[in-house]
Image: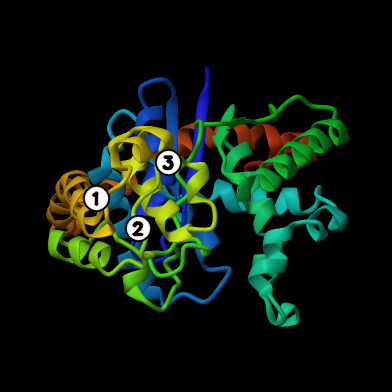
Amino acid sequence: MKLVFSGIQPTGNLHIGNYLGAVRNWVALQEKFKCIFCIVDMHAITVWQDPRILVENTREVAAALIAAGIDPKTQILFNQSRNPDHANLSWILNCVARLGWLNRMTQFKEKAGKNRENASVGLYTYPNLMAADILVYRATHVPVGEDQKQHLELARDIAQKFNSDFGSDIFSLPEPLIMGAATRVMSLRDGASKMSKSDPSDLSRINLSDSADAVAQKIRKAKTDPNPLPDSIDALSGRPEADNLISIYAGFAGMTREDSISINSGKQFSDFKKDLTDLAVSVLEPINNEMRKLLSEPEYIDQILYDGSERAIDISRPVMEKVFEAVGFRSCKRGEVCA
């Protein structure tokens, strides 16, 4: 059976970069695969999180995923910390993975920056936990962007080494799931920088929780240049802000960037921004309304996450039993002899 695993961090508002680059594709995956969608709160605490805000963010991300079209009844949606098998397998994989492999991981270097000695051990071993997330369900496919390919390759290396070390075939090698040309959404204030939750300017991003008025304001204030839109993608070279807005339009319209530039060729940005606003609001307003409704019922969201974790454990626990047996861990009742 083909099984897709994908995770997302609960670190504040999801924005249209998350939606157009990942979540929208996840919704489409439900038509073809059995899917496990995990809110990776254990990954989140590799850097400091206010515990109360982490709880709120976890609910908000769950609400956003459901509002965007993830079906928690037919698929599995839960937060990572509710299934202890992730942590158990992660420790075992820490003992299988090699330091040299982790030293090659570029994301640690980027996130730790110049204060590498002060970074948490969890941030360093983050890729091993990511491998555990995938392997504990024996997931066959993982949606990946450019920034995650290296981690998936590491998960495959760890799976191969575990199988070889312990003479087992417990872990299959997960395959990358390429969703086609992903919409890469850049900051509305700087077309050369990726849209990010951590950007201090809220005007740099459109959040899924933004009202229609807020969406309109942010698009209206988005950085552009004085020239009208050209008639070809090639002509966008050197115009990163224009290129970004054309990509966002294409993402919301479900069309190629070539088609997006074709139908908007020659427009001044004042007119184009109005059209983009109407299109964005038509997609985002229903999501926003449903999010608000869900967030007014936190107990309902918590129950969905609990139910999802129970279903996730039903899949992961038999795998962990095989892993424990392979590495020599035994669980015996009092008075029994473990051989």
> Mark 1 or 3 closer to N-term?
3
Picture residue at 56% right of the left edge, 46% below the top:
85
Give the alpha-carbon distance from disc 1 to disc 2, as whole Å.
16 Å
Q: Which residue is mark 2?
A: 15
Type of residue at label 2? His
Locate residue 20 relative to residue 238 in the image: left or right: left
Query: Residue 238, position in %: x, y?
Result: 54, 58
Residue nearest the observer in this picture, 266 or 54: 266
Where is residue 188, by image quadrant?
bottom left
Residue nearest the observer in this picture, 206 or 122: 206
The C terminus: image quadrant? top right
Q: Which residue is mark 1?
A: 276
- Disc 1 vs disc 2: which is toward the camera? 1
Locate residue 281 relative to residue 239 in the image: left or right: left
Type of residue at label 3? Phe
Query: Within 10 angstroms of label 3, few (less than 14), some, or many (20 or more) residues?
Result: many
Kind of element beneath mark 3? strand
Q: Which residue is mark 3?
A: 37
Circles 1 and 3, Cβ within 8 Å, touching? The answer is no
Query: Residue 322, position in %: x, y?
Result: 68, 31
> Mark 2 or 3 closer to N-term?
2
Residue nearest the observer in this picture, 237 or 184: 237
Type of residue at label 1? Leu
Kind of element beneath mark 1? helix
